[in-house]
Amino acid sequence: MTRPTRWSPTPEQIMFLEEMYRKGVRNPNATQIQSITAHLSSFGKIEGKNVFYWFQNHKARDRQKLKKKLLAQMNQQQILSQYPIDAHSSTTTTNSNNTNTNATLFHCPTDQYQIFPVTSTGIHQEV
Amino acid sequence: MTRPTRWSPTPEQIMFLEEMYRKGVRNPNATQIQSITAHLSSFGKIEGKNVFYWFQNHKARDRQKLKKKLLAQMNQQQILSQYPIDAHSSTTTTNSNNTNTNATLFHCPTDQYQIFPVTSTGIHQEV
DNA sequence: GCAAATTAATGATTTATTCAAG
DNA sequence: CTTGAATAAATCATTAATTTGC
């Protein structure tokens, strides 16, 4: 039996939806959903509710990703702690004096892009 | 004056960076970058920004590669038409072709955020 | 074999997004 | 709506690979 299978978007449909999303569409109203559905139906079977749910899910998962990223970054700290700073320069270093380890953090070419703002208490990078 | 030459990583440095990447490091924060830089400085001259750029580029180009693969999978369907372009339909005297005509609704490459013709009913679109 | 010429990789910059705080 | 922080995308620029003619 052709079970009532759930919608699975074609690559073209995904591409278009993502483009809409990128351009700012988050909660399309009925009119917008109609338009989008009409357009996307040329690439495959689709209903308005599919479009509605897609934006709901996409927005939610975007936020999920963001939060996941925060946790991932925390965990990276542990990975890196395996490699202590130490910098025992006894090895074959051509640059035994690491000038920028502490104070003069590398400033990017233009101060506009201040990657690592240094505060008196240290580095603060909020994400 | 030797012109400002760009950093070119040693094999050891590359190996270490790639190992970090494999372990999940993607966007190291300032502390992590300091740590990595300190460690890698024993293999050759290196600055924090080099590490920063390396991860930025490596991640981006990793993604490029994956995207390219996926795109290759999608047999060249009319994917490239992100927008239902009017498809230079004027070339033929008759414009009655295609079923994609509803597309014209979305032809809006210029107006970034006013994607849809607004109807009288108020659109609430989060921005 | 070897450089000059050409191409491919990749380091470094700039520009556009994103979310969300104010 | 505006803005800050972060970063992804796109681009520029230089180095490394490689091709080529000798």
Image (cartoon, coloured by chain):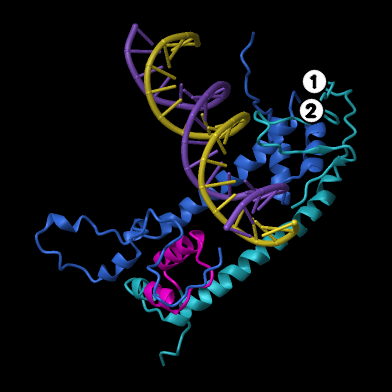
Chain colours: A cyan, B blue, C yellow, D purple
Q: Residue at x 39, y 74 (%)?
A: B119
On screen, D20 above or below B110?
A: above
Give the quarter of the figure containing the N terminus of chain B: top right
Residue A12 sits inside the magenta stretch? yes
Disc 1 to disc 2: CB gap under 8 Å: yes
On screen, A23 above or below A117?
A: below
As drawn, the residue found furthest toward the bottom would be: A1
Residue B26 seen in the figure:
no
Q: Which residue is mark 2?
A: B41
Give the letter of the chain under mark 2: B
Q: Which residue is mark 1?
A: A95
Q: Where does residue B66 sit, x and y in percent of width and height? A: 52, 52
Give the letter of the chain under mark 1: A
Q: Residues within 10 Å of mark 2 (few under 14, many from 20)?
A: many
On screen, B8 above or below A61?
A: above
- Local secondary structure at mark 1: loop
